Image (cartoon, helix red, strand yellow):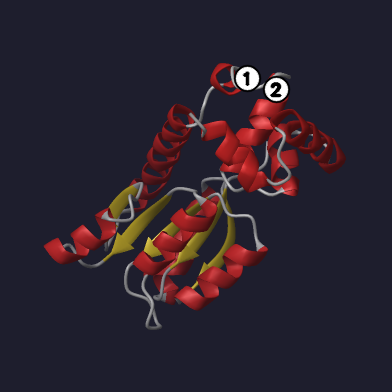
Amino acid sequence: MSKLKVLIVEDDAMIAEDLQDILIDAGYDVVGIAHNATKALNILEIRKVDFAFLDVTLSDQSTGIDVAHHINDKYKFPFVFLTSYSDSQTVSNVVSTNPGGYLVKPFKEKDIVPALVVACSNAQQKNVDNFPSIEVINSKLSIALSKQEHKVLYLIWLGKKNNDIAEDLYLSVNTIKTHIRRIFTKMNVSSRVAAINEAFKK
């Protein structure tokens, strides 16, 4: 099984490196460190990311909260905030992004991995609860989706690309493309967005 891919968005280089060491020692794959929002967004564009630690205050005008909103809008994976601030306004701003957790610096090494595990577990359960079951989707179709096609559609909903879906399901990219073509045919759609809209249609 592939390692969970983690992005660290932290403007303090020493803290970022300490966090990276903790995660690597725990068996995670740190795919990038960003000291500002611009670098974070660049990494998100070119690398697969499953989870992020986000500092609130970064070295450019944007904040970790801005990055969190971007993750929610485009990528939909869990994240935990690391911040030196615990005032009510900061907490309120953080809560608006629906984070997986909130750790106040200086954090303890023993708190990092549990925060990640809990955030990922909660996100997975939320996603499973929110996505329509295969029975609900197939009740609207003349040709039913298979269980594998339903899994592919679920991963599309999570915003994953073909390569990522293939990796998650231990299948070839060509097999995933075939599944997607069949999903589109059965749902009478021609795009991923249309397929997701059809899945959620009442």
In the image, 185 versus 114, the foreground residue is 185
Which residue shows up at 63% across the image and 43% down it?
A: 194
State the image coordinates of residue 187 (x, y, percent, origin top left).
Answer: 69, 31
Q: Is residue 38 above or below residue 23?
A: below
Which residue shows up at 66% across the image and 45% down it?
A: 192
What is the CA distance from the residue labelled 1 to the residue labelled 2? Answer: 6 Å
**Residue at mark 1:** 138
State the image coordinates of residue 35 (x, y, percent, origin top left).
Answer: 46, 76
Q: Is residue 71 above or below residue 34?
A: above
Which residue shows up at 54% across the image and 22% down it?
A: 133
Name the element at disc 1: helix
Q: Amino acid at mark 1?
A: Asn
CB contact under 8 Å: marks 1 and 2: yes
Quadrant showing the N terminus: top right
Let me know if residue 36 appears in the view: yes
**Residue at mark 2:** 145
